[in-house]
Amino acid sequence: MNDITTLDHVVIRFAGDSGDGMQLTGNRFTHETAVAGNDFSTLPNFPAEIRAPAGTVAGVSSFQLHFADFDIRTPGDHPDVLVAMNPAALRANIAELVRGGTIIADSADFTARNLAKVGYASDPLTDGSLTDYQVYAFDLTAQTIAAVAELGLGRKDAVRTRNMYALGLLNWMYDRSLDGTIDFLAHKFAGKPDIRDANIAALKAGHAFGETAELIATRYRIAPAPVLPGTYRQISGNKALGFGLMAGAARAGLRLFLGAYPITPASDVLHNLAAAKQHGVTTFQAEDEIAAISSAIGASFGGQLGVTVTSGPGMALKSEAVGLAVMLELPLVVCDVQRAGPSTGMPTKTEQADLTQALFGRHGEAPLPVIAAASPADCFDAAFEAVRIAITYRTPVILLSDGYLANGAEPWNVPDLASLPAIDPAFATEPNGPDGSFLPYARDAKLARAWAIPGTPGLEHRVGGIEKADGTGNISYDPANHEHMVGLRAAKVAGIAAELPPAVVDDPSGRARVLVVGWGSTQGPIAAAARRVRSTERAIATLHLRHLNPLPSNLGEVLRAYDRVIVPEMNLGQLALWLRATYLVNAESYSRVRGLPIPVAELAADLEAIVDEEEAK
């Protein structure tokens, strides 16, 4: 009989070779966690290589899941439980496991050769070096082979199901149902009944092993987290971003055209939207980044919502065409799912180092709105907002996500499409000039120019990259006109600030002297760190920015109200630079550029020291 211990939260990390199915295992455990009603946050972490060297530290793929009975903000700094499928997985992750944490290891792979490959002189499962942890070492490989033996699979195919055996064991440990994963496997391998049956058999065998072997003394239960009423689903940032683009196009009554070139970690947006043809979506996989954005601009000229999606290297290639969209003044959404750079950098690791590229990375005076998503689910709202601004103001908009948000997942309260605000494309349908002509660069009160669908009778016009004469859009080299048009385009973007919500500070105590300002995916670590700081009776204020250009109209006043302004970022201080230049305030950079989210414990400790410094003055 096993004891059941109730926990309020736990962090589990599945780790193994790239071919061991750790991402699938983590995703399935996350699905069952969502069904159980827990709040959760995930962090997939895998090599960039298609098939990294087996049995090496460099080839380890991991999936971390933090789930709880309360509102959580991050996937956790350190795992409480490590599932290690081989010595490399143990070597790569043991330093991050909390003291007293649990190790579940497949002892079958802990051979002398595999141990030597990762620098172990002896077997850590038996040499006493892991006495600080609870170690459960089982020959999961042999047990899996035995579980599927009657199905007639070869050894190689049988061993491939051991991730499902491990998943079944973890489902038993944490009181999770197998039903969802069984249904998933039945659907995924419907055309391969032997593989389907083997995976299901391994899953059930792992669960039964936990139930009958009595080798693990304790099971754990985490109660559901309180949530607002609604329909919830598990969602990744890339999927939410695609849904947000679709919702924006639907509420504007436009077809969505995505021109994209595959690039990690943005490719899933292309994959997801390619499956949505029946919902008014057209996808075009272009031969390169320049063709991708150029096709999207053409779609916008034709009266559709043009979108392109990429990552940092692709943004650099698109920069000239983004400038063209600024000159044309057409709606365009440019999604940059940031990754560690420069150059190829670390394609599967996260970073926030494209902010200055988004703000300034174009030829000439070419300002445009920049928006950043804060969490995987928030990618939906940020994408919808980008669509709204692009259409309303006839401008390209850069939407910043990152690899952590793109691949991570959390619960999402699915909105009712009809409840989202309508977006009026306000197409020109008749001549607007005093003489009965059509003036494509005549502007409304928001300084947005007229948008006419080509072929509309009487509204024939041309566009191009050469400077436009005000109103008519004719080619102009007049110095005074150029200065006027540069000013109009800048004023249009700056004017967006008038309709943005004001910057709102979170300061429960009302007495904080230190303000922490974040953007993008730092929202989770900052909120979690602030929670820890406040639990020590220290006062600290936080502010998170979605709109990075233009900034909220009251932001300068807010920043000047605090003695110190700290700006945590996964770069070398790009938002801090922008705030200092804009408001002449001493915004202090807090930089972490490691390809991973900012650790909460580290940030909280540093913020506590900063608060103490201020209080001592």
Image (tube, grey):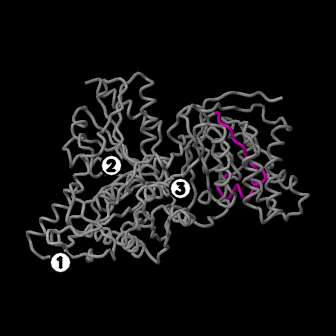
Q: Identify which amino acid the numbered label 3 is placed on.
A: Lys
Q: Earlier in the sequence, mark 2 or mark 3?
A: 3
**Residue at left 66%, top 43%?**
82
Q: Horizontal and vertical percent for residue 460?
A: 27, 77
Q: Which residue is mark 3?
A: 239
Q: Which residue is mark 1?
A: 475
Camera sees residue 463: no
Q: Horizontal and vertical percent for residue 567?
A: 33, 42
Task: Report the side of 333 relative to 265 (left or right).
Answer: left
Image-quadrant location for residue 476: bottom left
Task: Confirm whether the magenta stretch covers residue 62.
Answer: no
Q: Identify which amino acid the numbered label 1 is placed on.
A: Ile
Q: Which residue is mark 2?
A: 547
Q: Horizontal and vertical percent for residue 419?
A: 46, 45
Near mark 3 (Cα within 10 A), the count class, few <14, some 14-19 or many ≥20, is: many
Q: Quadrant of the N terminus?
A: top right
Task: Report the side of 529 relative to 144 (left or right).
Answer: left
| Secondary structure category for the residue under label 3 | helix
Q: Earlier in the sequence, mark 3 or mark 1?
A: 3
Range shown magenta: 100-120
Image-quadrant location for residue 149: bottom right
Task: Report the side of 614 relative to 36 (left or right).
Answer: left
Q: Which residue lies most toward the left here?
A: 480
Image-quadrant location for residue 531: top left
In terms of depth relative to the viewer, which is nearer, 18 or 101?
18
Q: Earlier in the sequence, mark 2 or mark 1?
A: 1
